[in-house]
Image (cartoon, grey):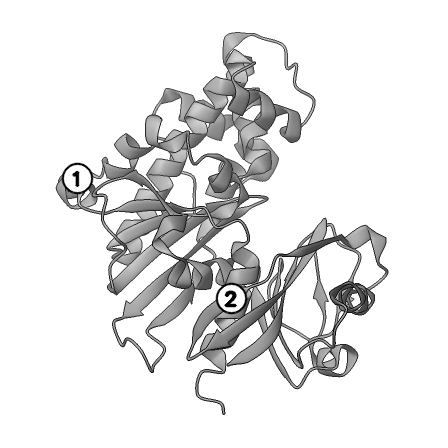
Amino acid sequence: MTEIVAVDIGGTHTRFAIATIEGGQILSLSPEVTLKTAGHASFQLAWEHFGEEAGRPLPRAAAICVACPISGDVLKLTNNPWVIHPARLPEQLGVDRLSLVNDFAAVAHAVAQVEEGHLHHICGPDVPLPDKGVIGIVGPGTGLGVGGLLRTGAGAGGADYHVLPSEGGHIEFAPLDSIEDAIARRLRPRFRRVSVERILSGPGLVNIYETLAAIEGRAITLPDDKALWAAALDGSDALAVAALDRFCLSLGSVAGDVALVQGASAMVIAGGLGYRLANHLPHSGFQERFTAKGRFEAMMNRLPVRLITHPQPGLLGAAAAFAQEHLHEH
């Protein structure tokens, strides 16, 4: 049994917890401590603050997920002033073993390890995720994360899955009706190439909303994406609700396309916005678009679609990545 510090470094907040792992599995995850990144001049100082709050010596092992690509000698995060040098982290943090993963790779690891109770049924057969094969993962948030899990069925004593990273959030947006044609026409001069992330993300809802306002000849009354999402989810603005309905349609289309590309036998919706849509997606047009794949419609109807509702998938996934990476160490 091994204790590690799990860390989820985001743009606004950094979350810490202590995880206990054994045999590639997460045995426990302590309640998280959330710190505002703006309140600390560096990650090392935030780590030291967590150590003080913990009131005990920290484990000499760490699992860190970061909201940026894990490559190069320097990691620079969006909306976060910290600069992280991976090679210096063991000395700065006082750890002997370290795993560093991208935030969406951590989500994929979390999907592999999360309990059934944290997988909310969206559509398709209400059955557990399969033990073998590919499970597709699509996660709208600040951007659009796309990845997958390959489950091998190896079982206890061996790593029974592999994370399949991708940049699938940047595939082309494929309009399927006149309204989506209008969205693409409106965005093309601004971005030249319209990727699905321009629609299926926090700011993407604004792009949909502005197009619908132009079609309806209505003034734009919601000032930013935060206000827009709030109005869409609480139903207080009809145009915002229409934009959210369109968001769910497009999410269904893209999730279905990802499943086809990956040869997936199940699909999981993740991401901060996915979490907020847990009660909305099952009653939206998501399923209709997910399965509307022509000659493959019957096959798509056989795929279970779940939504991960674990409150801290980043922390759980970072710990799971460490557990898998260091599985055979003694």
Residue 76 placed where, x, y %? Answer: 72, 62
Nearest to viewer (mark 1 / mark 2): 2
Within the image, what quadrant is residue 148 found in? bottom left
Give amino acid for label 2.
Answer: Ser
Of the pair 70 and 319, the residue shown nearer to us: 319
Of the pair 248 and 313, the residue shown nearer to us: 313
Count of numbered tags: 2
Residue matched to label 1? 297
Q: Tell me if residue 175 comes above or below residue 266 in the rendering.
A: above
Residue that lies at the very extreme toward the front in this rendered image: 55
Q: Which mark is residue 28?
A: 2
Q: Tell me if residue 160 comes above or below residue 181 in the rendering.
A: below
Q: Which mark is residue 18?
A: none
Q: Tell me if residue 181 comes above or below residue 158 in the rendering.
A: above
- Residue 166 is at least partly visible in this image: no
- Residue 268 is at least partly visible in this image: yes
At numbered mark 2, what does the secondary structure look like: helix, strand or loop? strand
Give amino acid for label 1.
Answer: Glu
Q: Is residue 229 left or right of residue 326?
A: right
Residue 16 placed where, x, y %? Answer: 66, 61
Residue 5 placed where, x, y %? Answer: 64, 71
Residue that lies at the very extreme toward the top in this rendered image: 217
